[in-house]
Image: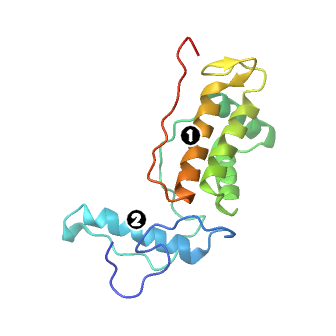
Amino acid sequence: MIVDGPAMPGEAEPLRYERGRGPLANDEVLANMRRRQRIKNAKVPADQHEDLTDRLPDIHGSKDPIALRLPTLLVEYLHLVALIEDLPLTAVFEAALMEKALSAPLRPDRAKERYFELADAMNVGRSHRGDSVSGLDLSRIREKAADLLAAIDELHGSDATVSSHRPDAAG
């Protein structure tokens, strides 16, 4: 993306995970907002361009509507949390999201792993989706194996691709 003048980190190109990084900095969030605004502006005529922001909005300012599809079980948990904490459901979502936004981003492979760990924790005592043998989620193990092999190939600079091996009925 072309940026007039000096660009903040994340303004011209999306930020990528860097080992040992801490929580997001305000300048990084602002730069990402500006990059996203440039992308939106590129899709509309010049007379409809919005000015690029030069500061972060206040947390108590306007709110952007977004649509999310969430597992029904998670929504039910959050409804009960809201009831017990005597908060609106939206406040429970906001608090959880603020906590995530203020923490250091995880390494991408660790973030995926953490997502599955949390989903498994919510699914305790329930039947698992996908094929399983003695409680093992084989589809998830295959996916993790493919991810690990792809990471190894990337580290070694290999152009080899990893294919998902699914044994047939004979094994």
Q: Residue at x 41, y 87 (%)?
A: 6
Q: Residues within 10 Å of mark 1 (few under 14, many from 20)?
A: some
Q: Residues within 10 Å of mark 2 (few under 14, many from 20)?
A: some
Residue farthest along the bottom direction in this orientation: 5
Q: Is residue 27 left or right of residue 85?
A: left
Q: Secondary structure at mark 2?
A: helix
Q: Look at the image and tell me whether residue 160 can be seen.
A: yes
Q: Is residue 47 above or below residue 79?
A: below
- Given residues 152 and 91, the one toward you in this image is 152
Whole-percent x, y for residue 107 in the image: 64, 57
Q: Residue at x 57, y 51 (%)?
A: 151
- Given residues 70 and 3, the one toward you in this image is 3
Q: Quadrant of the C terminus?
A: top right
> Do callouts 1 and 2 mark residues in contact (Cβ within 8 Å)?
no
Q: Residue at x 44, y 74 (%)?
A: 11
Q: Quadrant of residue 79?
A: top right
* Closer to viewer: mark 1 or mark 2: 1
Q: Residue at x 67, y 56 (%)?
A: 100
Image mark for residue 109: none
Q: Is residue 6 above or below residue 39?
A: below
Q: Quadrant of the N terminus?
A: bottom left
Q: Secondary structure at mark 1?
A: helix
Q: Is residue 159 above or below residue 38?
A: above
- Given residues 60 and 66, the one toward you in this image is 66
Q: Which residue is mark 2?
A: 36
What is the three-letter code of the residue carrying label 1? Ala
Whole-percent x, y for residue 89 in the image: 66, 41
Closer to the N terminus: mark 1 or mark 2? 2
Image mark for residue 146: 1
**How far apart are the alpha carbons under marks 1 and 2?**
32 Å
Q: Quadrant of residue 74?
A: top right
Whole-percent x, y for residue 20 in the image: 69, 69
